[in-house]
Image (tube, rainbow, N blue to C red):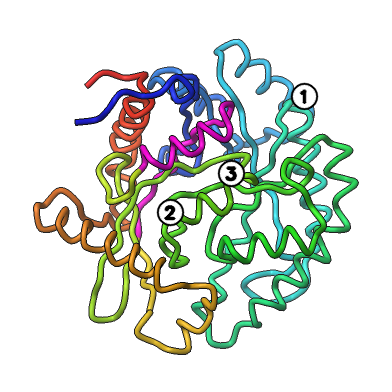
């Protein structure tokens, strides 16, 4: 039985990330209409699906801002990068120009954060550079963007994705001489933490002062012969303690938006490979035990046929209903829904 939500939780807004509904091919205005019709309080644009002949110019941004305000919706923006390399080729990339454009767009929208995701699976490639080198290059690039981001009034929110662990993000911020809320922060993706061998509760505790935006995402962690497999789940039906995580966020950041992200797919984490595991030097026995406990909860849910991975191929046919259900579940957690 779900306990009552605290006053701080009830004030939180629950929205949707554009990536969750990618198969619907919605324009930005259609995404906002979808949010209104399905009880969402706003939208985060991880990507912008522009109609033909529509330019992402200031006139468009001001119209989008006005439309969101008319409908009482919050807006959050994406498009940022933090690793100054092309993650497919390893070649240098001018992320200063990318982030300047994204910061300008966010500023025009009246948004103070830009989500940053460089999308690398470095540890999964044996030919990849050492993580410390990625950190050094990232710190060099971001230090040079401090004044630009501050001038735009924008915080670059580095997503907890598959590039850096929470420990490494904290080292990165230290290397950049940054303070929480200044020009660098975190977009906390609650499920991606599993893929980086981090307990969501412990990782959230570590990153809490830096969190400026969220991807509220449920999931599971299955123990297999090949290692651990992380996968997404409908919010409220996975193995994560979303309520506990949201309580932490609400206590530290009473104005944080809870942006639901969901998608298909799973990720093999080959912990049986000593070389792969050596890429996570901050992993402690305590954290590993917590992850194994989460794997046990996942197994119990799977055995009861309450939880199973959904392939990326199948996501288009289930995405809309699952996102609708997920929004309702998060609203119930914070005391804004029935059931």
Specify whether 152 is left or right of 172: right
For the point 51% across and 37% down, the residue is: 249
Answer with left or right where residue 9 lies relative to residue 338: right
Q: In this view, does 216 lie above or below 311?
A: above
Q: Marks 2 and 1, Cα distance to the nearest angstrom?
A: 40 Å
Which mark is drawn over residue 200?
A: 2
Foreground mark, 3 or 1, reads 3
Outermost residue to the left:
304
| Numbered tag placed on residue 59 in the rendering | 1
- Per the rendered image, the range of residues in magenta is 242-265
Residue in the picture at 49% in, 33% down? 258
Q: Is residue 89 above or below residue 266?
A: below
Residue 140 in the image, given as x and y percentages of width and height? 83, 66
Q: What element carries label 2?
A: helix
Q: Quadrant of the N terminus?
A: top left
Percent from the top left, x then y, of residue 36? 45, 18
Near-viewer residue (41 or 294): 294
In this view of the protein, which residue sits in the foreground, 215 or 320?
215
Kindly report which numbered mark, 2 or 3, lies closer to the viewer in this rendering: 2
């Amino acid at each position: 039985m779900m306990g009552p939500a605290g006053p701080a939780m009830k004030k939180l807004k629950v929205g949707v990330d554009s990536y969750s509904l990618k198969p619907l091919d919605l324009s930005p205005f259609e995404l906002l209409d979808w949010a209104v019709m399905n009880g969402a309080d706003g939208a985060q644009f991880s990507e912008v699906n522009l109609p033909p002949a529509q330019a992402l110019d200031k006139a468009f941004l001001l119209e989008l801002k006005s439309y969101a305000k008319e409908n009482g919706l919050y807006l959050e923006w994406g498009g940022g990068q933090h690793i100054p390399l092309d993650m497919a080729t390893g070649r240098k990339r001018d992320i200063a120009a990318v982030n300047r454009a994204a910061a300008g767009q966010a500023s025009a929208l009246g948004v103070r954060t830009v989500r940053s995701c460089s999308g690398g699976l470095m540890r999964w490639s044996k030919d990849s550079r050492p993580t410390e080198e990625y950190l050094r290059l990232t710190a060099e690039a971001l230090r040079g963007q401090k004044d630009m981001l501050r001038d735009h009034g924008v915080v670059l929110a580095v997503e907890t994705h598959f590039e850096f662990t929470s420990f490494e993000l904290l080292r990165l911020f230290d290397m950049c001489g940054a303070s929480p809320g200044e020009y660098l922060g975190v977009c906390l993706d609650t499920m991606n933490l599993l893929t980086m061998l981090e307990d969501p509760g412990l990782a959230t505790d570590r990153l809490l002062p830096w969190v400026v935006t969220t991807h509220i995402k449920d999931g599971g962690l299955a123990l297999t012969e090949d290692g651990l497999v992380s996968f997404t789940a409908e919010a409220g039906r996975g193995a994560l303690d979303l309520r506990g995580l949201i309580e932490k966020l609400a206590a530290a950041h009473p104005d944080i938006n809870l942006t639901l992200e969901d998608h298909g797919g799973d990720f093999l984490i080959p912990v049986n490979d000593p070389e792969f595991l050596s890429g996570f030097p901050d992993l402690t026995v305590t954290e590993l035990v917590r992850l194994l406990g989460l794997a046990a909860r996942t197994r119990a849910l799977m055995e009861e046929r309450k939880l199973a991975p959904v392939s990326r191929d199948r996501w288009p046919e289930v995405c809309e209903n699952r996102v609708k259900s997920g929004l309702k579940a998060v609203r119930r957690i914070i005391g804004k829904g029935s059931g």
